[in-house]
Amino acid sequence: MSRIAYVNGSFVPLEEARVSVLDRGFLFADGIYEVSAVLGSRLIDNEAHLARLQRSVGEIELPLPETLARIKEIQKELIARNSVIEGLVYIQVTRGAAERDFVFPKGVKPTLVMFTMVKDIVNSAAAKNGIAVKTLPDIRWARRDIKSVALLAQVLAKQAAAEAGCQEAWMIEDGAITEGASSSAFILTQDDVLVTRQNSSAILPGCTRKAVMALAEELQLRIEERPFTVAEALASKEVFITSASSFVQPVVTLDGQTIASGKPGPVSLRLREIYVEFARATAD
Ligand code: PDD
C-alpha cells in the first residue's frame, strides 16, 4: 500500500504528490516547516508546534492557506490513512508557485504539503546508548527563531557529523553552543544545574525544550538559560538533546571526547522517561 501525502487540498499517493518547479520553496527556500511526533497514533505537543508554525509564517508574511484547525484535521487524517502508530507528521508551507522573482508574488496561493513518516522514537538504540555529537561553526542566517526550510547549513553540518561517525552536530558561535542542527542542547553541570541557551533569534524555540524544562522544574532541578561552551559541556555530569523526533536523547561523546562515564546519565534518562509519560498523557 502506498503512503498517502497531502498536497494543496488533495490526499494523493506519495509518488503522485507534486509541486511546480516554480514553487518558491524549491527556488528560494521561501517557506516554513514543522514536525510533530506521533505516539499511539496521536499527536504529541501538537498545539505548541502549530503555534510555532503560525508564528514562523507571520514572521515572513506568509499567510497560511488553511486554518490551524483544518491543518490539525489533515494531520489526523494522514495518521489514519497511513496507519501511523509511532512516527512524525511533516508540514511545509511555501509562498507558492510563480514566475521567478525575488519579490513576493501577488494573488498566488501558498503551497501546503504534509506527509507522515514511521519512526521508532520511544524504543530507539540512540536513546538507550546515547549519541555522539560533533561541533561545527554555526554558519546559519540570523533568524534561527523562524523554522525556515532553508536548511543547507544544517544539511552540511549533519553530513560532516555523519562522516565523523556522529548522530548530531552542535553549532558554535562566539565560543558558545547555539543548538543542535535539528535539536536543542542541554548540559547538567557538576552542581546539578540544567543549562540550556535562552531563546532568542540565535536558536529555534524548541517545543520539546520547553516541555522538558517544565518537567525538570517539577523535579525541582535548578535551571539556567544561558549560552555554554564546549569546555563546559565536556566538564559536565550529563549532556542531552531534545527534539520532536528524538524526545530526550543522551549525548555520550563530544568531538570524540567522552562525557563523564560515557554512559547516558540518570537525569537525562529520567527526563526522557517523564517526557514520554507527559507525551502519552497529553497526546491528541
Ligand atoms: N528539528 N533546533 C533546531 C535547529 C531544530 O531544527 C529543531 C527541530 C529543534 C527542536 O525543536 P522541537 O523540540 O520543537 O522539535 C531545535 C526538527 C525535528 C527537524 O528539523 O526535523
Image (cartoon, rainbow, N blue to C red):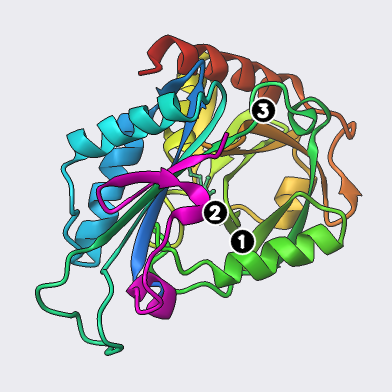
In this view of the protein, which residue sits in the foreground, 35 or 5? 5
- Under tag 1, what secondary structure? strand
- The three-letter code of the residue at mark 3 reads Asp
Asked whether the residues under the numbered discs 1 and 2 touch, taking CB atoms below 8 Å apart as contact, a structural biologist would say: yes
Number of on-image labels = 3
Please say whether residue 117 is one of the residues in the magenta stretch: no
- The three-letter code of the residue at mark 2 reads Pro
User: Hey, which residue is sitting farthest bottom in the picture?
Assistant: 101
Give the residue displayed 77% in from the left and 60% down from the top: 161
Image: 9 above or below 236: below
Give the residue displayed 43% in from the left and 55% down from the top: 17
Residue 31, position as x, y percentages in the image? 34, 65
Residue 130: quarter of image: top right
Q: Which residues are magenta?
A: 1-28
Residue 10 relative to residue 204: left or right: left
Residue 121 relative to residue 7: left or right: right
Give the residue displayed 26% in from the left and 69% down from the top: 96
Residue topped by disc 1: 176
Residue 197, position as x, y percentages in the image? 51, 49
Mark 1 vs mark 2, CA separation in Å: 6 Å
Residue 256 relative to residue 50: left or right: right
